[in-house]
Amino acid sequence: MKNFETVSEQTKDFFQRVFEITRLIPEGRVTSYGAIAKALGAAKSSRMVGWAMNASHREKNIPAHRVVNRNGVLTGKMHFNPPEAMQERLEKEGIQVIDDKIVNFKAHFWDPQIELGQ
């Protein structure tokens, strides 16, 4: 992935749209890369949502720790410093994590398409 400062304007716009949705995820809830991609009308762009989450650490007030893979696994934890910070933030919000996976993932899942009425 290119440095965020050198990506195209179209990619920056996509990232900003990802950030907007991510900021709406309520505390104590999580969503997936794919759910964000679908909400943006780009269902096959979950990997690009992941790239946006990696770049989100340069932005303010983006709860990237609330975005996980489709199975509730903390696949983005390596982009936190330290990597354990992702789990720690989720646990502070009342979400139990065992072996890098959210316990009772479906109960914590926030679907932007449903929640935002899209």
Image (cartoon, rainbow, N blue to C red):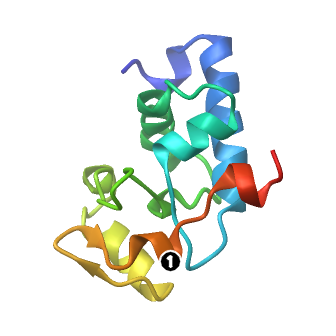
What's the residue at 61%, 77% (across, down)?
27
The quarter of the rendered structure image containing the C terminus is top right
Q: Is residue 32 above or below residue 2?
A: below
- The residue lying toward the viewer, choosing from 11 and 31, is 31
Residue 50 percent coordinates (x, y)? 43, 38
Residue 112 percent coordinates (x, y)? 68, 53
The quarter of the rendered structure image containing the N terminus is top left
**Residue for badge 1:** 107
10 Å neighbourhood of mark 1: few (<14), some, or many (≥20)?
few
Q: Is residue 72 above or below residue 78?
A: below
Which image quadrant for residue 3? top left
Residue 34 percent coordinates (x, y)? 49, 40
What's the residue at 64%, 23% (across, down)?
12
Residue 33 percent coordinates (x, y)? 48, 44
- The residue lying toward the viewer, choosing from 23 and 114, is 114
- Quick one: which residue is furthest to the left in this view? 99
Q: How many marks?
A: 1
Q: Is residue 92 left or right of residue 86?
A: right
Amino acid bearing label 1:
Ala
Q: Secondary structure at mark 1?
A: helix
What's the residue at 70%, 24% (across, down)?
13
Q: Is residue 102 above or below residue 49?
A: below
Q: Is residue 98 left or right of residue 7?
A: left
